[in-house]
Every structure is written in structure tokens, then in C-alpha cells.
Amino acid sequence: MPDLTRALRALLPSAVGLGQTDPQGRYPDLGPPGASPVRRAEFAAGRAAATIAMRAIGWPDAPIPMGDDRAPVWPAGLTGSISHTRTVCLAIVAPVHAASALGLDIEPEHALSPDLWDEVCLPAERRLIATAPDPAAMATLIFCAKEAVYKAQYPWTRQMFGFDRLAVVIGADHFAATFLAPTGTIPAGTVWTGRHLCADQHRIAVVHRP
């Protein structure tokens, strides 16, 4: 089992399937028409990872097309999330009776450039970055956590929003994200929690809501 899969598996309930692939591997070309070769390869690897995750929970193979909003269209009764970097792709899936929402994001440990910190992070989050032993890694983790929450909420609300919608507090291996404005059916002040880890020079954040 690859190191990232092993580390993430420890954070997930057994009802959640997990798959990992290499975007530089060879998979059926399912990429969106007109996309670049790199984007097509990432898309194919993501769907392959999702298929591995589906098989891990005994779910039959099924296509996962891209919707008009570019989000995955999961088979009926299933929910999931896909994330990738240039070197790794991860997918998590679960039956809807075991997970009302799933969100996953993976980033290289120092992916967030300092010139983006003010755009991504609220004042309290920037103070956390300033006091962190590794400010660049902390900034990336905050970004990663917000992305995971965004992916988890999107199938519920179909709402797109900026980074200032979520206020993130980081713990040792967990995080809490507060919605600062109403988002679809999610009231302002609602807190969604998640887990995070660092493995193989990557930051991973995951949200699982029963």
C-alpha cells in the first residue's frame, strides 16, 4: 500500500473507499474534449483512482462523467471526492447512507506561494502562519483545509464562493472551518470539521460527514 494511502486510510471510516494512482501512468483516456494532454492524464488518473476506491467498498464499476459545472457526477447512491497533484492522485468514495458529504484535497507541502497568502487567508489565519515553525507549510494546510470543505459542501449547495467564506482553525491532526455567511442550506456560523496529515511531502485534508 503506498505511503499516502496508508496514512490517509488511518483517518477514514471503513465505509469510505480510497484509491491512489499516478497521473503519469497509463489509463483509459477519458479526458474532456479539447483539454491539454496533462489535464487529460490527470482526469484519467482521477477516474482510475475513483474506480479503485469503489471496488474497495464492493461498489460495481461505473462511469463518472464530468458535469456542466466540471464536478464529478457520481453514480446514484454514491458520493466522493477526487484530488491530485502532478505526481499523485487520490479519490475517496462512500455510499450516501455512510457519508452525507466527502471532501478531499492534496497539495505539495509548500504549494501556496507567499503572494497568495493574503488572498487565501483571513487575518487570524495569517497570524497563525506568522507564528508557525514552517509558515509556508501552514499556509498550504489552511488552503488545503478550505479546499476540502469547499468540495464537501458543493454537492449539497451547488454554491461557489471565495476563500473568505471559511474561517479555519488548525489543530494537531484536525481542523474546524466556520462558514461566515449563509451558503445554500448551510447557515452562517455552521462549523464543519476535518482531519489533516502530512505524508510524502504532501499536505492532505479530508472532510467526512456521516
Image: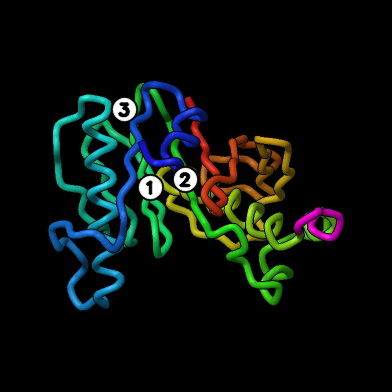
Residue 99 is left or right of residue 133, and the answer is left
Q: Are marks 2 and 3 in contact (CB under 8 Å)?
A: no
Q: Which residue is mark 2?
A: 104
Residue 116 is left or right of residue 202, and the answer is right
Residue 95 in the image: x percent, y percent?
Answer: 31, 27
Q: How many C-alpha atoms fall within 10 Å of the one at disc 1: few (<14), some, or many (≥20)?
A: many
Q: Are marks 2 and 1 in contact (CB under 8 Å)?
A: yes
- Quarter of the figure with the N terminus: top left
198 and 210: which one is in front? 198
Residue 180 in the image: x percent, y percent?
Answer: 70, 49
Asked which secondary structure carries label 2, the reply is strand
Q: Which residue is mark 1?
A: 90
Residue 107 in the image: x percent, y percent?
Answer: 52, 57
Q: Amino acid at mark 2?
A: Leu
Q: Amino acid at mark 3?
A: Pro
Q: How many C-alpha atoms fall within 10 Å of the one at disc 3: few (<14), some, or many (≥20)?
A: many
Identify the residue at horizontal 79%, vertical 58% (top origin). 129
Quadrant in the rendering for residue 117: bottom right
Residue 19 in magenta?
no
Q: Earlier in the sequence, mark 2 or mark 3?
A: 3
Quadrant in the rendering for residue 44: bottom left
Which residues make up the magenta segment? 129-134
Q: Nearer the viewer, mark 3 or mark 1?
A: 1
75 and 42: which one is in front? 42
Asked which secondary structure carries label 3, the reply is strand
Residue 114 in the image: x percent, y percent?
Answer: 70, 72
Q: Earlier in the sequence, mark 2 or mark 1?
A: 1
Q: Which residue is mark 3?
A: 95
Q: Are marks 3 and 1 in contact (CB under 8 Å)?
A: no
Q: Earlier in the sequence, mark 3 or mark 1?
A: 1
Identify the residue at horizontal 64%, vertical 72% (top origin). 113
